[in-house]
Image: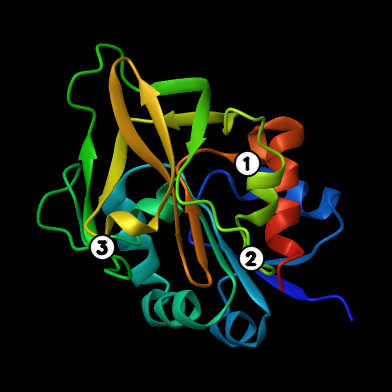
């Protein structure tokens, strides 16, 4: 039986491209902000673009905060870009606005990079690769070259700084600054880059997620 994925709709601008990518790889996916549908789905994809504060505001306005928190702790869960950042406790972009606090840590602006936003293709270096069956990162590791790097597409000015360094699954260097570009904790995978805009390797990562449950 084909598993159902809820693509959470809180007004994010990249919903359509993520939906198209998931449909292209054969996933059964529904764009929704219906709490009942989200609760009944087998997995969650949580994308987003824009500012930390406005994303949190939109999530709360749609009454999605608790269902997202519950899903992140109980279902296969993929966060993309802002959908990664708001999982953390707070962000420098909008001081005083609390994130979802599913993961401990904060979101900071690039410190030394001269050109912001970081936009375009860049390497992701794999950290703490998980090779066990069922791991969302297993296929990501398998498709990486021998130097454990692969290029993905980025558009962002802020990045996450996890308190627990063991959850860091990918790092990227931009203009002399190394930042966390992927985290993995149990059922949850979140990435700063856009797999839906990253060609074949992005589709392979989405397939890896879909095939993991």
Identified at 76% across, 47% down, the residue is 20
| Label 1 – label 3 distance at C-alpha | 23 Å
Using the image, tell me which numbered label, if any, was put on residue 132.
2
The structure residue drawn at horizontal position 16% and vertical position 44%, both measured from the top left corner, is: 92
**Image position of 39 with respect to 145: above or below:** below
Q: Position of residue 138 (x, y in %)?
A: 65, 55
Which residue appears farthest toward the top when viewing the image?
114
Q: Which of marks 1 and 3 is in front?
A: 1
Disc 1: CA contacts within 10 A as few (<14), some (14-19) or many (>=20)? many
Seen in the picture, residue 134 relative to 21 is either above or below; the reply is below
Sequence-earlier tag: 1 or 2: 2
Look at the image and tell me in which quarter the C terminus lies: bottom right
Number of the front mark, 3 or 2: 2
Q: Position of residue 187 (x, y in %)?
A: 53, 72
Left or right, 46 with respect to 43, comes to left
Q: Is residue 73 above or below residue 152?
A: below
State how many labels appear. 3
Of labels 1 and 3, earlier in sequence is 3
Quarter of image, res 163: bottom left
Q: Where is residue 198 in the image (x, y as percent from the top left)?
A: 66, 32
Q: Name the residue under label 1.
A: 195
Q: Element under label 2?
A: loop
Cα separation between marks 1 and 2: 22 Å
Assess disc 2: are there few (<14), some (14-19) or many (≥20) residues with their C-alpha within 10 Å of its C-alpha. Answer: few
State the image coordinates of residue 28 (x, y, percent, origin top left): 81, 67
Colour scheme employed for the rendering of this structure: rainbow
- Which residue is label 3 attached to? 99
Label 1 SS: helix
């Amino acid at each position: 039986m084909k598993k159902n994925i809820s693509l959470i709709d809180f007004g994010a601008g990249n919903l359509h491209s993520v939906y198209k990518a998931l449909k292209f790889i054969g996933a059964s996916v529904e764009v929704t902000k219906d709490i009942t549908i989200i609760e009944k789905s087998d997995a969650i994809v949580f994308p987003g673009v824009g500012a930390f504060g406005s994303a949190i505001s939109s999530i709360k306005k749609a009454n999605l905060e608790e269902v997202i928190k519950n899903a992140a702790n109980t279902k296969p869960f993929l966060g993309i870009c802002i959908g990664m950042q708001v999982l953390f406790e707070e962000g420098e972009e909008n001081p005083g606005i609390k994130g979802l606090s599913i993961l401990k840590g904060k979101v900071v602006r690039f410190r030394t990079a001269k050109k912001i936003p970081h936009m375009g293709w860049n390497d992701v270096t794999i950290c703490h690769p998980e090779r066990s069956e069922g791991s969302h990162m297993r296929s990501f590791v398998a498709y990486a070259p021998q130097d454990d790097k692969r290029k993905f597409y980025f558009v962002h000015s802020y990045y996450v700084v996890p308190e627990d360094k063991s959850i860091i699954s990918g790092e990227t260097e931009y203009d002399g600054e190394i930042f966390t570009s992927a985290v993995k904790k149990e059922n949850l995978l979140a990435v700063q880059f856009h797999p839906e805009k990253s060609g074949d390797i992005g589709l392979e990562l989405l397939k890896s997620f879909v095939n993991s449950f």
